[in-house]
Amino acid sequence: MSATASTGRHVLVVDDDRALRHAISALLQDAGYNTDQAGDGPEALDKLRERPVDLMLLDIGLPGMNGLDVLTEARGGARPPRIVMMTADDTPEMLLRSFRGQAHSFVRKPFAPKRIVEVVNDVLAASDAASLPIEVLSARPEWLEIVAPCSLAVAERVQEFVMQLDATLPDDIRESVAQAFRELLSNAIEWGGRLDPNRHVRISCVRSKRMLMYRIADPGEGFDINQLAHAAISNPEHDPLGHDRVRQELGLRPGGLGLVMTRALVDELIYNEKRNEVVLVKYLD
Amino acid sequence: MGLEIVEHTVGDIAVLTLKGRIILDYDESPLRTAVDTLVQQGRLKIVLDLKDVNYIDSAGLGILVSKYISVNRRGGNLKLLHLTPRTSHILEITKLNRVFECFESEDDAIRSFEEPRSPYSAGVVHS
């Protein structure tokens, strides 16, 4: 986002560390944002009542009323801003409590100055659909289960949170799982949910010592694996572009490579009979 | 972060340096627009520098494929430069490493347009 695009957007920085609060505000002002500051939860809530705020950067470890309590009150207000949680406590429990509280994003301290500006840019660039509520059915680190509206903007938010839970995994495994999860979730939302935010996908993420398992159930009718000439998985060995010709004939957007990619990135990919539910498994040893 | 594109020209070859993510986007894809603009101008020798592309999903890969086909149909060529290990892996598992010519230096990518065109040259990584 350019400075021009950020002009007029209002960011409230909430942290009890005065020096950090000032530093973040200065960075955001340089990027073209209007900023305000609060040193504790009650002051932050007062500022939210005084004037509309587009985004609140909210420290979790505030004295007295902590950031998670502020999150709950702020989200229940008449004009809730998008909220990005900041914390040095990067335990999965803290991440999940932020997610359940409908935080938009989560940033671990310490962060590079450039990073915080990028996060603010990205969160404010997301469409309004990204702020739709996500129902959290289970918020255990070993078993996260959620129901989310069929919106690609929401999928982005879900993926960011889910993949932060996997932050301790080796890079290659984390990247492979992240990509496979994103492909399957996008498929479920686009084809199963037809990008209709009134329809929902149900997502379960189960972590054991030896494997990661993700299950995605979409509201669609499923599909027939034998009717996928528009997908690269049906290409003959000598013709890696065959599916694209079919997609052009059918007027489909470019793509069709998701299933091929996903199969290569995880250890197991299992569909139910209708193929509107899928489980991916990645073994860790 | 979206996708930023900076263009520079070497002779009659357009080099587009991409930064960010190439992903499913129902808004107008900046990559599609940039390549279509070059094609409309009759500039059919194109290099995409992917050094600063940190993520490509299947739809983004689909855009690369569709633009490759569209440029080739008009007698041009679209080649890739500076693949990250991640992008290289994605091309490999989708077998698109057999389709795209990929280079590790801009000079080599530029020089390759002087060579006689061969359908068998695609898919080679030139270092």
Image (tube, coloured by chain):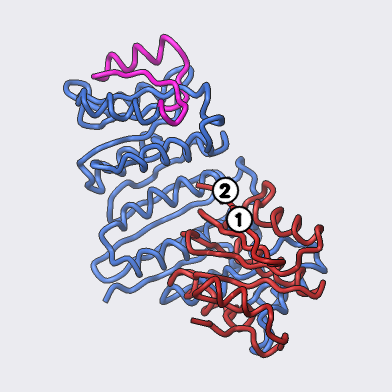
Chain colours: A blue, B red
Name the quarter where the C terminus of chain A is drawn: bottom left
Q: Position of residue A192 (x, y in %)?
A: 63, 56
Q: Residue furthest front?
A: B11
Under mark 2, the amino acid is Leu
Whether residues under marks 2 and 1 lie with C-beta atoms below 8 angstroms apart, the answer is yes
The percent coordinates of residue B108 (x first, y second) are 56, 77
Query: Regarding mark 1 in the picture, which secondary structure is present there?
Result: loop
Name the chain letter of the residue that bears numbered label 2.
A
The mark found on residue A252 in the picture is none
Residue for badge 2: A152
Could you say which is closer to the camera, residue A101 or residue B94? B94
Q: CA distance from mark 2 to mark 1?
A: 9 Å
**Circle 1 residues within 10 Å: few <14, some 14–19, many ≥20:** many
State whether residue B28 is above or below residue A207: above
The region drawn magenta spans A29-55
**Residue type at numbered disc 1:** Leu
Q: Is residue A138 left or right of residue B81?
A: left
Question: On the rendered structure, is A264 left or right of A258?
Answer: left
Residue for point 61% across, 70% down: A257
Label number found at residue B24: 1
Q: Nearer the viewer, residue A59 or A13?
A: A13
- Respond whether the residues carrying marks 2 and 1 are from the same subunit: no
B5 part of magenta stretch: no
Look at the numbered disc 2 and give the secondary structure of its residue. Answer: helix
**Where residue A129 sits in the image (x, y, percent)?**
57, 37
Chain under label 1?
A: B
Residue B4 vertical position relative to residue A232 in the rendered view, above or below: above
Q: Is residue B64 above or below residue A10?
A: below
Residue A193 placement (x, y as % from top left): 62, 51
A41 drawn magenta: yes
Going 70% across and 70% down the picture, which residue do you hit? B68
Quadrant of the rendered image containing residue B37? bottom right
